[in-house]
Amino acid sequence: MIIRKMTADHIKYAAEIEKECFVHPWSEQSLQGEMTKENSVFLMAFEDEKPVGYVGLSVVLDEGYMGNLAVLCDYRRQGIGKALMDELLEECRKLDLAFATLEVRESNTPAVKLYKGLGFEEIGRRRDYYKEPLEDALLLTKYFKEI
């Protein structure tokens, strides 16, 4: 597996991954809008040159806000999500961020376990944040500096 920074050529693959992974996937246009912002970091994982997952982060001042982490179903449970997160967290350190934060479905036990294993802490919840099905989001944050 190889992880690279996403380019415009990768957007269509990220949109395909979105469609497989989420009830309300981001469109190619939305992904392009986010990825091309100067303050964003998007990484893609490749298995034998096939795009199999991606992760995105927006940076505001010294704060990181993670959008989506998505891995194709056939490639889950192989460490790809963790590898993407490890690389993203390294980018956060290089950018000297104070923290990175994200929302995750309360019922997404594998993702919650992954994030907590990487040092994210539950700092709150967003009631009824997700639709289809209606569900709370856990707000998880990893601190890189003392606040």
Image: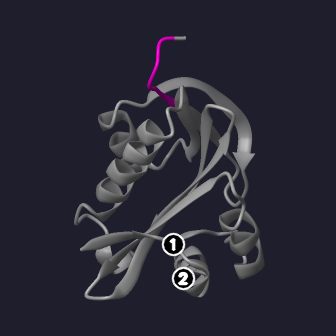
Query: Residue 90's x, y, as percent?
Result: 37, 44
Circle 1: residue type: Met
Magenta span: 140-146
Q: Secondary structure at mark 1?
A: loop
Q: Is residue 142 magenta?
A: yes
Are discs 2 and 1 less than 8 Å apart at CB? yes
Residue 26 lies in quadrant: bottom right
Rendered view: 123 above or below 21? above
Name the residue rendered at 28%, 73% in the picture. 2
Residue highlighted by disc 2: 10
Name the residue rendered at 73%, 77% in the picture. 27
Quadrant of the frame with the C terminus: top right
- Measure how far apart labels 2 and 1 are at the Cα level: 6 Å
Quadrant of the frame with the N terminus: bottom left
Name the residue rendered at 41%, 49% in the picture. 111
Query: Residue 82's x, y, as percent?
Result: 31, 53
Residue 77 lies in quadrant: bottom left
Residue 44 is tagged as none
Answer few, some or many: residues within 10 Å of disc 1's Cα (few below 14, many 20 plus, some between 14 and 19). Answer: some
Residue highlighted by disc 1: 6
